[in-house]
Image (spheres, grey):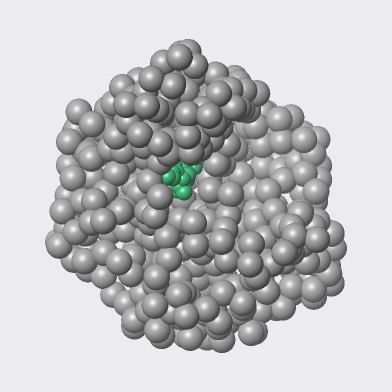
């Protein structure tokens, strides 16, 4: 086992990894920018190294600084968290070249799944059901129009290098194709340096269902059921739950096995998420994330396992501590993402926290790096906390969420807490009757942008 792990991240996910290290008796090293000198992850880690100025390109994304921090502190492995360098194949390669260990999949896995066209092609060959669409990239507007006509509108044009909801445009008709095609290409180019796009049938009322997989890199892999992340704003998840309210045990076993087998087949190592759209009882693969997800705690809640501990174990060459048969669902878990944002426009709202009080009690988990007097810097993501609740069933989890939100105090900045208070008043949320468009429609009618 490792003696010391460096966490190449900040915020709540850095705390999450430090906590796992501490429970395993492993030393932790935080890295931070000058803007984060007073951040909680720096205070909580055993050691810390300042790796650059506020801009993430010069700090949390600076590979030479992170490798140097490992060498200075003697850390043997790097946990990337999510975002930043977590899906950067070159980073993984460099880590290996320095005889260090990356806590995550191989550079090859990241490369294959990081390109959406290659990922889809690979999954198709492994027997994973995919959204109907163009076979590979589409280079010209003429081809795009021909495919649109053949497939039938609406279609979605996606940048193969896209992520975080960027580089995706819907064309509702042939007339909208030119604009959608050009915009998706331009967004792919400017955000990801790659203008290749492909086309998929646009599903009109799907749910977003993702399967958590876990592999040991030696041909063994399991699945940990699904998460329903259909409540999204601008293709970004805001509320996630497990199990999915619309998924039966038979469906879970079927799609879970397909995903576990696919992961085993490619000798996948560590945590991964295979994302699907789910409509009329069918699953359609959209992408695979080769890292720990923001919403992993809901899976931890219902299975009672520590996914970060498991990531560290397999990275150190140990076997997984559970088999498929060991994994039994217990109850229901929900996560809401608390962002420092001003409603109704969701504009970022950094600033000083004058009062912070985290909720507690049975079945409540608050993953956050906030503290009284902390100043949220303006340079990074606006996620400031995740409130996760667990109950014996979905109604109990929802009631607990309402109770915990009532206890949560974040003063000094605007947050998305009122959004969740309002959502808990909605009958559709209680019945689980929502798809990926539900929240956008609800926001249009309930929260008019100023
Ligand atoms: P990203 O990598 O940017 O997160 P994804 O491919 O995972 O992109 O898609 C993100 C979201 O976009 C999905 O959860 C869904 O809401 C929407 N989406 C993607 N593909 C389709 C599709 N074929 N039809 C309808 N919606 C889609």
Decide if residue 49 is on the left or right side of residue 23.
right
Q: Residue at x 23, y 45 (%)?
A: 259
The mark total stands at: 0
Query: In the rendered view, would you say 181 is above or below 420?
Result: above
Q: Nearer the viewer, residue 335 or 185?
A: 185
Q: Quadrant of ligand 1?
A: top left
Residue 230 appears in the figure: yes
- Identify the image quadrant of the N terminus: top left
212 is higher (above) or lower (below) than 371 = above
Task: Give left or right: position of 49 versus 215.
Answer: right
User: Quadrant of the rendered structure where residue 58 is?
Assistant: top right
Residue at x-position 48% and y-position 86%: 399
Spot occupied by residue 363 in the image (x, y as percentages of width and height): 45, 80
Give the residue drawn at x 35%, y 49%.
Answer: 277
Please tell me which residue lies in front, 3 or 166.
166
The x and y percentages for residue 159 are: 50, 27
Question: x, y (%) of residue 134?
Answer: 34, 25
Q: Is residue 94 visible?
A: no
* Residue pictured at 19% horizontal, 59% vertical: 251
User: 107 left or right of 56?
Assistant: left
The quadrant of the picture occupied by the C terminus is bottom right
Q: Locate residue 369, reporting x and y percent.
A: 66, 61
């Amino acid at each position: 086992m490792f003696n010391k792990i460096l966490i190449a991240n900040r915020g709540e996910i850095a705390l999450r990894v430090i906590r796992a290290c501490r429970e395993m008796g492993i030393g932790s090293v935080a890295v931070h920018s000058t803007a984060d000198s007073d951040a909680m992850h720096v205070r909580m880690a055993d050691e810390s190294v300042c790796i650059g100025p506020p801009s993430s390109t010069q700090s949390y994304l600076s590979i030479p600084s992170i490798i140097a921090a490992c060498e200075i502190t003697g850390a043997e492995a790097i946990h990337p968290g999510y975002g930043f360098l977590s899906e950067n194949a070159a980073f993984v390669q460099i880590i290996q070249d320095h005889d260090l260990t990356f806590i995550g999949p191989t550079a090859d896995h990241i490369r294959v799944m990081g390109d959406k066209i290659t990922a889809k092609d690979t999954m198709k060959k492994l027997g994973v059901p995919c959204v109907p669409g163009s076979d590979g990239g589409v280079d010209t507007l003429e081809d795009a129009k021909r495919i649109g006509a053949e497939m039938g509108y609406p279609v979605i044009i996606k940048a193969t290098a896209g992520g975080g909801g960027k580089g995706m445009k819907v064309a509702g008709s042939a007339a909208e194709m030119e604009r959608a095609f050009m915009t998706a290409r331009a967004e792919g180019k400017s955000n990801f340096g790659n203008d290749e796009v492909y086309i998929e049938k646009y599903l009109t009322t799907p749910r977003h269902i993702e399967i958590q997989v876990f592999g040991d890199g030696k041909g063994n892999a399991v699945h940990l059921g699904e998460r329903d992340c259909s409540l999204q704003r601008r293709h970004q998840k805001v509320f996630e739950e497990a199990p999915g309210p619309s998924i039966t045990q038979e469906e879970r076993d079927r799609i879970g096995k397909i995903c576990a087998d696919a992961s085993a087949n490619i000798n996948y190592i560590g945590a991964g998420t295979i994302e699907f759209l789910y409509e009329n009882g069918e699953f359609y693969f959209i992408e695979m994330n080769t890292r720990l997800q923001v919403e992993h705690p809901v899976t931890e809640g219902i299975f009672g396992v520590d996914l970060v501990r498991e990531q560290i174990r397999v990275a150190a060459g140990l076997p997984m501590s559970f088999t498929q048969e060991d994994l039994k669902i217990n109850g229901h878990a929900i996560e809401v993402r608390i962002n420092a944002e001003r409603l109704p426009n969701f504009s970022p709202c950094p600033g000083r926290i004058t009062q912070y009080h985290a909720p507690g009690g049975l079945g409540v988990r608050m993953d956050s790096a906030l503290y009284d007097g902390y100043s949220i810097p303006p340079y990074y993501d606006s996620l400031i906390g995740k409130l996760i609740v667990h109950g014996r069933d979905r109604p109990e989890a929802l009631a607990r969420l309402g109770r915990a939100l009532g206890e949560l105090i974040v003063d000094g900045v605007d947050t998305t807490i009122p959004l969740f208070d309002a959502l808990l008043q909605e009958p559709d949320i209680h019945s689980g009757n929502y798809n990926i468009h539900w929240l956008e429609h609800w926001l249009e009618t309930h929260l008019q942008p100023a």
